[in-house]
Structure formats: C-alpha cells, structure tokens
Image (spheres, rainbow, N blue to C red):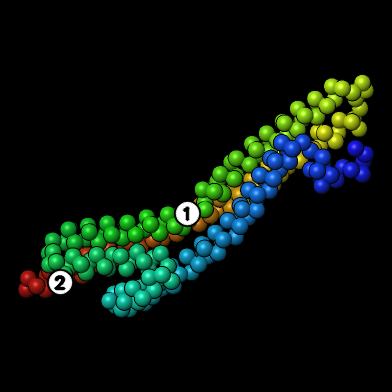
C-alpha cells in the first residue's frame, strides 16, 4: 500500500473481513442511534408542550368535568398529563357512583389509578432510551475488538517479511485503528443524548408526579366539602 492509499475508504476496503464486519455493525448502530436521537427529541418536545398546555388549562379555572370531557375526546392525541388526569377522574367518578363515602378509600383508589397511568406513560416516554445506553456502552468495546483483531492480523502478516519498516507497519495499524474511531463515533453522540434525555425525562416525571399530588388534594377538598354539606 502506498501513501496515496492511506485514505479512510482505502483502509476500510483493505481491512480483514472480521474488521470490516465490526465496522459494518458500528455503522448500522450509529445510523440507528441517530434515528433514535432525532425521534426521541421530537417526542420529548411534543410531550413537554402538551403537558404545559394542559397544566395551563387545568389552572385556568375550567371545571373538572369540562376538562374530563375534553380529555376523553383527546385520549389518543392528548399528552401524558391529560391522560393521567382522565384516569384519575374516571376512577373517582366510578367510586362515587358506587356511593363509597370513605374519603381514604376514595382517594386511595383515585391515586392508584393515576399512578398506574403515570407508569404506563413513563414507560412509553422512556422507550428507545435503553437502546442509546446500549450503543453508548458497547460501541467502544466493539471498536476495540476490531482494532485488536486488526493488529493481530497485521502482525501475522509481518512475520513473513524479512525487513519491517514504518511504511509497512503503518497501513495495517491504521486499518485497525479505524475500527476504534468508528466505535467512538457511534458511542459519543449516543451517550450525550442518553444523559440529556434521561435528565429531561426526570423533569417530566417530576412535573407529572407533582400534578398527581395537587390534583389529589383538590379532589380530597371537594370530597370533604361534599361530605360536610351532606352532614348539614
């Protein structure tokens, strides 16, 4: 191999088939990782917007019944917080229809319904995050395996040479190092996106948990007021 063949493409084409297979795996992982990164960015942006819009409507003074009717219509297009609210209201109304007067039982059932909905929504939001974590943690080691194999292959070829110079060693070592570079190229964006999205999801989860507690307090006050009025 002469100096003009030291381009990245030439190094890839002249690498051993094992190293080429490692490079192909890393390229596929990188493409899938970037697709997940862009898709997850759009998903989280949409979730934050929908949650903020619903929370604004919730505190604007609109009645709970009107919000529930709207949430029932927007079951598929609404945000996670709206669906959590709808599940809580649905359970609350079912328990009220069964004439359950114990406040603790009523609120416990409502909270459990919202918690179950919250967990489902959180699992949906976190989908794809584990893939980014896997790419971030595994890709460098896959690239390192390709490098080690390439170096071994190169030194095996050197054994039949009578005279070894830098010109003969450099191409084989460079071929192997390309695998490490590709592993880092796949891992760095994945780990950056994973950390950023994990932080954003934690903030969304905290916002939704706070809403569950605030909404539960509102329902509990309503139940207390209704019970007090019935007693009088």
User: How dense is the environment of label 1, judged by Cα within 10 Å: few (below 14), some, or many (20 and up)?
Assistant: some
Q: Disc 1 or disc 2, which is closer to the eye?
A: 1
* Spot occupied by residue 152 in the image (x, y as percentages of width and height): 75, 27
Look at the image and tell me whether residue 205 can be seen. no
Q: Is residue 223 above or below residue 118?
A: below
Return the residue at label 2: 226
Is 19 drawn above or below residue 87 in the view shown?
above
Residue 36 lies left or right of residue 50; in this view the side is right
Which corner quadrant of the image does residue 36 belong to? bottom right
Q: Position of residue 110 (x, y in %)?
A: 25, 61
* Foreground residue among 118 and 165: 165
Q: Position of residue 212 (x, y in %)?
A: 33, 61
Residue that protrudes farthest toward the left in the picture: 232
Q: CA distance from mark 1 to mark 2?
A: 39 Å
Which x, y percent locates residue 1? Answer: 90, 37
Please name the residue shown 64% across and 36% down the image.
Answer: 141
Q: Which residue is found at the position 19% from the left and 61% from the top? A: 106
Residue 28 is labelled as none
Residue that numbered label 1 is attached to: 126
């Amino acid at each position: 191999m002469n100096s003009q063949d030291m381009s990245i493409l030439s190094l890839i084409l002249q690498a051993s088939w094992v190293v080429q297979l490692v490079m192909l795996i890393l390229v596929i992982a990188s493409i899938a990782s970037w697709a997940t990164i862009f898709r997850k960015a759009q998903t989280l942006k949409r979730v934050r917007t929908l949650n903020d819009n619903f929370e604004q409507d919730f505190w604007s003074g609109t009645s709970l019944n009107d919000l529930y009717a709207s949430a029932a219509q927007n079951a598929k297009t609404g945000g996670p917080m709206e669906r959590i609210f709808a599940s809580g209201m649905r359970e609350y109304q079912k328990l009220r229809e069964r004439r359950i007067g114990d406040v603790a039982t009523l609120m416990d059932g409502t909270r459990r319904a919202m918690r179950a909905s919250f967990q489902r929504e959180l699992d949906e939001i976190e989908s794809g995050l584990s893939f980014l974590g896997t790419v971030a943690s595994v890709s460098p080691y896959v690239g390192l395996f390709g490098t080690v194999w390439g170096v071994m292959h190169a030194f095996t070829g050197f054994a039949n040479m009578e005279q070894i110079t830098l010109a003969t060693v450099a191409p084989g070592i460079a071929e192997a190092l390309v695998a490490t570079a590709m592993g880092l190229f796949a891992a760095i964006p994945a780990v950056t996106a994973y950390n950023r999205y994990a932080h954003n999801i934690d903030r969304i989860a905290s916002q939704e948990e706070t809403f569950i507690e605030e909404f539960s307090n509102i329902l509990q006050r309503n139940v207390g007021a209704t019970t007090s009025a019935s007693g009088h």
